[in-house]
Amino acid sequence: MQTIYYDLRDTKGQQKEIEDKISAAAKILREGGLVGIPTETVYGLGADGSNPAAVRRIFEVKGRPQDNPLILHVTGAQWLPRYCVDIPPVAYTLARKFWPGPLTMILKRQPGVPDETTAGLDTVGIRCPNHPVTLAIIREAGMAIAAPSANTSGRPSCTTAQDVMEDVGGRVDMVVDGGPCTVGVESTVLDLTCEPPRLLRPGGLPVEDIERLIGHVDVDRAVVASLGPEERPGAPGMKYRHYAPKAPVTVVTGAPMNSAREIERRAGPGAGVICFDEYAHLFPQQLVHSLGPSNDKQLQAQRVFEALRSFDATGVTEIFAQCPDNRGLGLAVSNRLKKAAGFHVIDADSQRIILGITGGTGAGKTSALDALRSLGGTVIDCDAVYHAVLSGSEDFKNAINEKFPGVFSQEGQLNRRKLGQEVFAKRDRLDQLNAIVFRFLIPELERLVAAQEGLCALDAVNLFESGLDRLCDRTIAVTAPTELRVKRIMGRDRISEQYARLRINAQKQDEYYRGKCDCELNNATESPEEFRKDALLFFERLVESIREEKRHG
């Protein structure tokens, strides 16, 4: 078969020519053909979702197992009643917020949706892709397009039209080139037929964003482990080994520096390595494909399939991959890498647990950290590390003095009160100070964290601004009522009420920390001893849940 290739990347081209190509693609779909289509997530292999014969061709071309359901692509929520029944109001809430975009909703299907599309389930996956070309094709065709990823089954998904031609060219009728995919991993799949909703597949929409809109979402076991041979998948990508290159993959989880060192220890000269930019220099004898910086999960999502596919044209015999944590888009990237590895995962952190403790001054972090020490944990006090690094670095002192002249005495001692009065009153000056501090402090903190074993807490007011949250298994906001904080600071630091309030007002409010952190530990008690007891129970439960998670995933 001769595959027609249409390049629609040139948005400055003749509008009539573009419309003609879109019409040609729609005509092929109406006649039962297959078209490779671009979306923001990955390229799809599209067919008329209501035509059983056309859908069967998708399975044949991909070599896809018959019990792996497909997703219908539509142009908006107005299409839902056409293909779904018993639609809950939350579906429309989600569609208004996240469509077009990388969210697939699992709903009860209309009887007219063929079993071939749903793999015989009484539910159907449906989403509205965020790509103008494919939306135009759907409108012109007048039908929902069933479109799994356009790779052959088991291989890494396609994020360019060239990938599609490589995998299925000559076996499909047309491939439409709409440029590289901007998200890079498939859509998030959310089952709305249960309460609470259940995450079946992490993807381009972080589950945290969904939970901020509709509340708690359960996570299906298939997200972190493979389904058994008798278990039936409720959504694409749940059961079978997916995204796999030719060479076997081993995923290494843990803090970035730890996972990089573990790969360095294990990878021989003939291995391929997928790693974050900061650690590529550790592998001069290996073929390396970078995922991007360790803190840029959006770029990691865009590159993960390209990285997996890149080794197939080489002679590598095994691949080791660094893995991001499970927050935000990291959950989707981690899921794809682990599925590519058949869930062959090495935890570089072992039983090490790093907790990030943050919150405003006077909230009670000291008491919380005392409770954590009673559990045998160690504490890295970022403020203490800051002063230790400052005292030993003339470059650090000079950088501060250049921006804030006069804050050091002739003997080289920092006048903290003078510096504080300047930066606490002006947000831009505080940002300037933080930029200097982060530059000198982060490398030392990364070294200290990497050397930890067992339970450790990172005490950092600027946990998120500095990017240190990426080193943590969980982040905890310690919060407290403002008036209690003022009272505590005045007594602790022997300062005036005016200066205490100035310090509090210069910091982020509790809502900021609540929105950023994984957990909240609220301190509304007048008694430090009572709060330590509450914190001890909180940390016991949290640490046990993290250990349980590490044991099973």
Image (cartoon, rainbow, N blue to C red):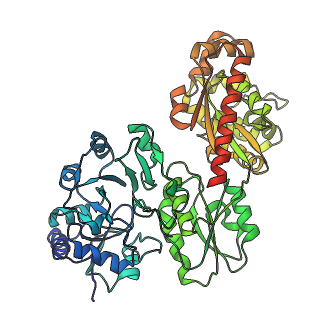
Residue 168 visible, this angle? yes
Q: Position of residue 518 (x, y in %)?
A: 56, 38
Between 273 and 29, the residue placed more toward the observer is 29
Left or right of residue 82: residue 510: right
Between 148 and 134, the residue placed more toward the observer is 148
Check the image and report above or below for 351 versus 227: above
Identify the image quadrant of the N terminus.
Answer: bottom left
Q: Position of residue 478 (x, y in %)?
A: 62, 28
Left or right of residue 184: residue 143: left
Quarter of image, res 4: bottom left
Please tell me which residue is depicted at 69% across the width and 37% down the height of the picture.
Answer: 402
Quarter of image, res 390: top right
Q: Position of residue 197 (x, y in %)?
A: 40, 44
Left or right of residue 133: residue 532: right
Q: Position of residue 270 (x, y in %)?
A: 68, 80
Please tell me which residue is depicted at 34% across the width and 83% down the height of the picture.
Answer: 169
Identify the image quadrant of the C terminus.
Answer: bottom right
Check the image and report above or below for 88 versus 524: below
Quarter of image, res 379: top right
Residue placed furthest toward the bottom: 1
Residue 300 visible, this angle? no
